Image (cartoon, rainbow, N blue to C red):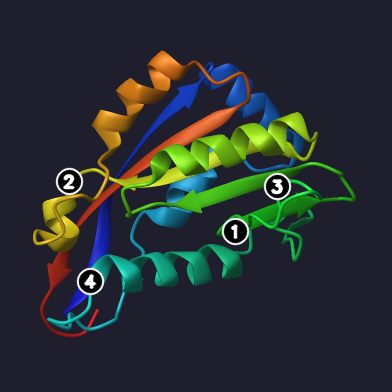
Amino acid sequence: MAFKITNVKATFFPSEEAVASALNTFGLPAERFGEALDGFVCSAPVVASRGYQQDLAAGLEAHLGSVAFGNGITVSWDRTYSEALNERADVTFASNGHKQRVFVEIEFRPNVEKDLVNFQIGHNAGRLAAAILILACDRNEINAAYTTMPEFWKFVGVIRELRPGYPLMVCGIGGEHMTGAP
């Protein structure tokens, strides 16, 4: 049973303008990133002994790494937030020799705070131009049995209180499991 993303929500910190400015430096409009998520189909089968969110995260990571965004944007082999640490983002985009990167985290595990800390470390190290965090809108759409999956609206509230000083786009994805071929 494949999973198709049919709904993408986005919110921006500290503001939509700050995120747009940072992403436009890379020639990557926020709406283009959302379009890359919308309609994505993860064709991995649902296996009772394995959490589907693992396959969906891996599929999204591969998909985002293969999208031709254009404008000189490439997937960066250097996904580290800091030269002093070995923490790596799920996907990192580079553009035209910029030192800074766009770091993307796909988070279906209950450790979103770790991603926010890594984004801050990347910002402090001067490596982060913008951050993109992808969460489930409704965990039940992906895997109802996984009750600790973080959800978009809950963490939008947490991030609002945190007030990050770097450009951050939080994307919530929703969808449905489809029967038959995608």
Q: Residue at x 9, y 58 (%)?
A: 144
- Which of label 3 and label 1 is nearer to you? 3
**In the image shown, does 101 or 118 lie closer to the viewer?**
118
Which mark lies nearer to you, 4 or 1? 4
Q: Which mark is residue 91?
A: 1
Let me know if residue 131 appears in the view: no
Disc on the earlier residue, 4 or 2? 4
- Per the model, the C-alpha gap separating discs 4 and 1 is 21 Å
Residue 177: give x, y in percent of width and height: 15, 68
Q: CA distance from mark 3 to mark 4?
A: 28 Å
Classify mark 2: helix, strand or loop.
Answer: loop
Q: Earlier in the sequence, mark 2 or mark 1?
A: 1
- Look at mark 4 in the image and give the residue it sits on: 51
Residues marked 3 and 4 touching at CB (< 8 Å): no
Gap in angstroms between the C-alphas marked 4 and 2: 15 Å
Q: Which mark is residue 45?
A: none
